[in-house]
Image (cartoon, rainbow, N blue to C red):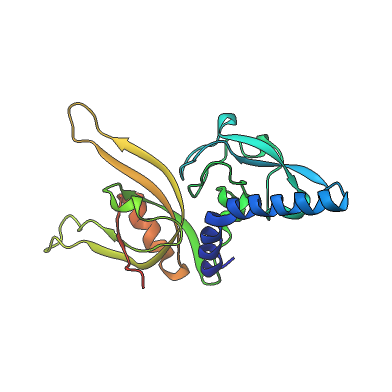
Amino acid sequence: MNIVRIRAMLWRMRFLLLGITVLALVGTIVQTISGLQPQRTNVVVSAGPLKAGSTLTTEDLHTVSVDTALLPEGYLSQIEEGVGQVLVASIPEGLPLPRSMLLSSDFLDSAPAGHVIVSVTVQADGTESLAQPGSTVSLYAPAEEFSETANAVLVAETAVVVGVGAQATEGGFMSESSSTVVLFVSIPTNVASVVLGYDSATAMRIVLHRTA
């Protein structure tokens, strides 16, 4: 799976629910007229709107019966398959849950040639809410401690967001709190070691690229 396919998949997901509903209605009418009974199977769908980074529970999912001709690729048929999994992109209520939207080894191995998918922790300063799967960002680390300038360090010029993980808040009553969020990004293999090195030491910041 390359980045173009990831972006296309995420765009199509917006219209998948409407398309399935329309196709199911048309299929039912045609089969009623012809007197045929369609083959159906259970598909796991979201019980409500689900945010990226959510760990799925039984309350988040339920099954519906769908015509086998309308099955989405990589669909789940049992709720247990999704329980405990982490969702890497937000989905609306009633959308079939494909395996490609779950954090797994298959997901992490889906980077195009010459790229790798890594997780990075970034400051939750509001920008991260716009960094949805398919968007392109630059990764910056805080200026080094003994640096002569206060300029942030550019760690990766181009990183494509392919998933969103959990958000965490640190600090408490006696100290200033700060929030971070985990992003899954596709980056060139030759900068992966640098990105992971900075990520192990500090939370980075992101700058969104302008869309054409």
Task: Say whether residue 178 is left or right of residue 136.
Answer: left
Residue 28, image x and y in percent?
76, 49
Q: Which of 139 and 95 is in front in this view?
A: 95
Up/down of 184 relative to 176, above or below: below
Q: Which of 15 and 107 is in front in this view?
A: 15
* Residue extending farthest front: 33
Up/down of 188 relative to 202, above or below: below
Which quadrant of the view contains residue 191? bottom left
Residue 47, image x and y in percent?
57, 36
Up/down of 55 relative to 162, above or below: above
* Residue extending farthest right: 35
In which quadrant is the N terminus drawn?
bottom right
Which quadrant of the view contains residue 198? bottom left
Residue 55, image x and y in percent?
51, 37
- The residue that appears at 69% across and 39% down in the rendered structure is 64
* Residue extending farthest left: 148
- The residue that appears at 48% across and 39% down in the rendered structure is 54
Residue 196, image x and y in percent?
40, 57
In which quadrant is the C terminus drawn?
bottom left
Asked whether the viewer can see residue 177, the reply is: yes
Asked whether the viewer can see residue 71, the reply is: no
